[in-house]
Every structure is written in structure tokens, then in C-alpha cells.
Image: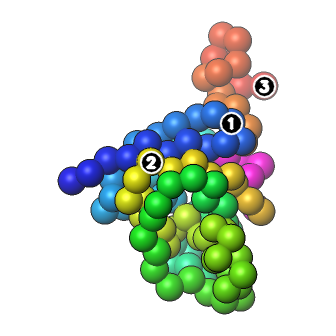
């Protein structure tokens, strides 16, 4: 099984993601509280990201959340995309606030703010 490095442009954080799992599944391992994962099937749109570098395979996504133009521009739903190379991405929409905030253990003393 191939593993790829996924970099979140917004924070500089990286995680490993198998070519057999979705970017969303890998992203959940970052340990961020409150990552909205929604339906995990491409229908709710909360896991919208923009792939800025790398290649991926994709499954069907709701046109209500991802237009053809979005898809052509690399804007996809993380639950419906699997990496086929190392990936860089920007987090969009509802998920941005959760993914782009620091983990509790990165604050001095590891305390919650």
C-alpha cells in the first residue's frame, strides 16, 4: 500500500495518507477537535478543500457543493478524494476554522486556552 504526504497549506502541518483512504480520513488523524466530517459520502459539502499540488483519484461528488468549474480548479470534497502522490491543499468553507486552529498541546504547558 502506498502512503503519501499531505500538506495543509494554511498551517504547514503534514500527515500521511494511504492511497486507499480519503484525504478526510487522513486529516482526522491531525487530532483537531471539531473537524466537521458530515456525511463522508460527498453529499453535505463540509469537507471542501482545494488541491494546490499533487495528483488524486476522485469519486462522485454532489454538484450542489462542487460544480464542474470547482472540480476543474481542484476544489473537491476531501471525503471523496484519495491521494495518488504527495498533495498540498488549502482548506475551504466550514472546515477551515477547525483545521486551522492550533492543537491544545501546542499551547504553552499543553493547557487549553
Q: Earlier in the sequence, mark 3 or mark 1?
A: 1
Instruction: Tell me if mark 1 has few (under 14), some (14-19) or many (20+) residues whose alpha carbon lies within 10 angstroms of its own.
Output: few
Instruction: Tell me if mark 3 has few (under 14), some (14-19) or many (20+) residues whose alpha carbon lies within 10 angstroms of its own.
Output: few
Residue 61 rendering spot, x and y as whole percentages? 56, 83
Label drawn at residue 86: 2
Residue 30 rendering spot, x and y as whole percentages? 52, 40
Q: Quadrant of residue 103?
A: top right
Q: Earlier in the sequence, mark 1 or mark 2?
A: 1
Give above or below for 4 relative to 103. Answer: below
Numbered disc 1: secondary structure:
loop
Secondary structure mostly seen in magenta is helix
Q: Which residues are magenta?
A: 94-99
* Residue 53 visible here: yes
Q: Nearer the viewer, mark 3 or mark 2?
A: 2
- Which residue, given by chain and number where applicable, does mark 3 sit on? 113
Give above or below for 14 relative to 25. Answer: above
The span from disc 3 to disc 1 (Cα, nearest Å) is 19 Å
- Which residue, given by chain and number where applicable, does mark 1 sit on? 11
The span from disc 3 to disc 2 (Cα, nearest Å) is 33 Å
Amino acid at each position: 500500500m502506498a502512503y503519501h504526504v499531505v500538506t495543509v497549506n494554511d498551517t504547514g502541518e503534514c500527515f500521511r495518507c494511504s492511497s486507499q483512504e480519503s484525504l478526510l480520513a487522513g486529516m482526522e488523524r491531525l487530532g483537531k477537535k471539531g473537524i466537521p466530517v458530515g456525511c463522508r459520502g460527498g453529499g453535505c459539502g463540509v469537507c471542501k478543500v482545494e488541491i494546490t499540488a499533487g495528483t488524486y483519484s476522485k469519486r462522485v461528488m454532489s454538484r450542489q457543493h462542487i460544480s464542474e468549474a470547482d472540480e476543474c480548479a481542484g476544489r473537491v470534497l476531501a471525503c471523496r478524494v484519495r491521494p495518488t502522490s504527495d498533495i498540498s491543499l488549502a482548506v475551504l468553507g466550514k472546515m477551515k476554522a477547525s483545521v486551522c486552529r492550533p492543537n491544545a498541546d501546542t499551547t504553552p504547558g499543553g493547557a487549553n486556552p
